[in-house]
Image: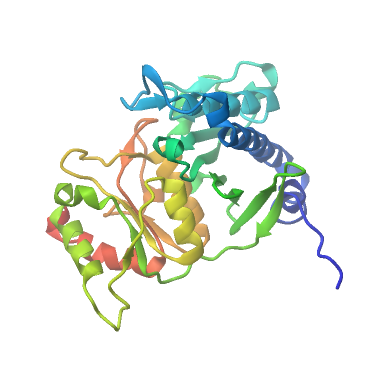
Amino acid sequence: MKKKERLTAYQYLLKDKLSGDKNRELIALLKDIKLAGRQVAKELNSATLNNTIGEMYGKKNTHGEDVKKLDIIANNLFIQSLENGGNCAGIVSEEKEKVLIFNNEVSRNSKYLVCIDPLDGSTNIDVNVPVGTIFSVLKRPNLVDKTFSKDFLQIGSKQVAAGYIIYGSSTIYVLTVGKGVDAFTLDPVVQEFYLSHENITIPKKGRMYSVNQGNFYEFPLALQEYIRWCEQEDIKSGRPYSLRYVGSMVADIHRSLLKGGLFIYSKSKSAAAGKLRLLYECNPMAFLIEQAGGMATDGKKRILDITPKSIHQKSPIFIGSADMVKQINKFLKSRLFN
């Protein structure tokens, strides 16, 4: 049997999803993200030996969260790759309080912007749990305007590409450019990402849900009722559902994407707006999951229809298999979610 040709991420995009000269800059930008992700994977693999595990003592990010050494390393690697590539005019990062605009001449003329969480789930690094990078790519609406910080505040449906890189037993680059979802797995020998999952479709139904159940009594009553519903035995609906919660958004959503399921990060008594950031966590994941056939809401409306007012704006999110999102929405429409 003839061995099937392996396509790199660059070859696949050029040949299939982004063919044509008009897409060359976007392909190059996605390559810059991929190259930085490859370097982050190397850093993670040797972190214990290089003494880069643990926190930057006394340092907190713009959200008041403790910063890990690898948060800073990952952030710097992505900034360096995106700036050197010249295919991105500026970025919003979880680790930066303000918009970072690249000042070199090539970057200033780029038509793309990137919003990124360089290392999602970094609190899990010390115990070798999968972590990831989440990113969103937007197009600048006005190339003449050189002070374009406000250009990042676009609704999620305006994204031209989004995805994540999961660093686990293998490193996988999951991507959408608005034409379905594909994944590329890193070959550690040649250090190249090859197409491994083509046109991924999330199962319409699932039997797993991901939520931090330790916050149960912090949640709105409507969500408490849904969780109790998931725990009840019912042969027709396949309940009880299995609770699977890693505590890393990338890991939990990656499992839901491939196996079917629902990821929940709700508002609560102590976090009235939720904790996940709209621009570089909720929006890219919602765009990707919708492209795979799933759904994503904030409990009241579609995530991709929310108009952002600030770069670090937070949002609740309920995302995953379409039937599961529809089911939880029935509970969340109750006055008990207000």
Q: Which residue occupies the foreground of this view, 225 or 303?
A: 225
Indicate left or right for 208 with 190 as reference: left
The residue lying at 47 percent from left, 69 percent from top is: 203
* Residue 63 in sight here: yes
Residue lying farthest to the right in this orientation: 2
Residue that protrudes farthest toward the bottom in the picture: 236
The N terminus, quarter of image: bottom right
Residue at 16% from the left image edge and 63% from the top image edge: 225
Q: How is the image coloured?
A: rainbow
Up the image or down, 216 lies above or below 109; here it is below
Left or right: where does residue 163 sit relative to residue 153? right
In x, y percent, where is residue 69?
A: 47, 24
Total labels: the figure holds 0
Residue 338 in view, yes or no:
no
Residue found 29% across the figure and 68% down from its top: 327
Residue 70: image x %, image y %? 50, 28
In the displayed structure, 199 sits above or below 307; it is: below
- In-front residue for pair 201/170: 170
Residue 76 is situated, as x and y percent measured from the top left of the image, at 56, 23
For residue 35, side relative to residue 313 (left or right): right
The residue closer to the viewer here, 182 or 330, is 182
Figure check: 61 above or below 278: above
Where is residue 309? Give x, y as percent. Answer: 34, 33
Please report the residue visible at 43 percent of the width from the left and 30 percent of the height from the top. Answer: 94
